[in-house]
Image (cartoon, coloured by chain):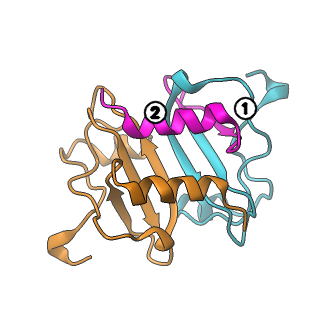
Chain colours: A orange, B cyan
């Protein structure tokens, strides 16, 4: 994930980090999505359905070790499989 | 959701709120799961697969309006449908 291919969950608009911290999203968080199959590096995912602030669903993954947040493309078959596996996985 | 039926995402063990805030979970967050079909009240969900701190996958939903967090049972068919719908939903 180089600097020119950052799939970070930085908000498109720059309205209040403090509002984000209290759980209010005022815009889309994803700028671009990760195309590589990074399933095994994912610690957890957050799914935010389309709403009045962002019309498309957003899937935001937090990576193991680094804690980096990356956005995933909800329609990608590998993303759907990763989520299914995460839901059923027992350690 | 009455007081005696709270499906909150309070950690079972009480290790460091500060650690939780930096994204480190040291134990399971779910005590019990919500049995009612509350799909339309969900603002977003977080999916945490089983790991060394908590062997079962946890699905933690944040509710619209109240911001309350409730745990969902990953194996419930309605929960799987809600997640699928959230992933595909455009506003």
Quadrant of the rendered image containing residue A15: top left
Q: Which residues are magenta?
A: B62-91
Q: Which residue is mark 2?
A: B85
Q: Secondary structure at mark 1?
A: loop
Residue sitting nearer the eye, B14 or B74: B74
Q: Chain of mark 2?
A: B
How far is the residue under mark 2 from the one under mark 1? 18 Å
Picture quadrant of residue A58: top left
Q: Is residue B78 magenta?
A: yes
Residue wearing tag 1: B34
Is disc 1 surrounded by few (<14), some (14 to 19) or many (20+) residues within 10 Å? some
Can you name the residue that lies furthest to the left here? A4
Mark in the foreground, 2 or 1: 2
Q: Residue at x 18, y 75 (%)?
A: A3
Horizontally, is A60 left or right of B65 in the view? Answer: left
| Image position of B86 with respect to A20: above or below | above
């Amino acid at each position: 994930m180089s600097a020119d291919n950052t799939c970070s969950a930085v908000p498109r608009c720059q309205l209040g980090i403090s509002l984000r911290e209290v759980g209010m999203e005022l815009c889309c968080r994803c700028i671009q999505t990760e195309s590589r199959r990074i399933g095994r590096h994912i610690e957890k995912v957050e799914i935010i359905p389309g709403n009045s602030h962002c019309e498309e669903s957003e899937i935001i993954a937090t990576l193991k070790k680094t804690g980096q947040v990356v956005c995933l493309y909800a329609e990608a078959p590998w993303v759907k499989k990763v989520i299914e596996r995460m839901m059923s996985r027992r350690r």
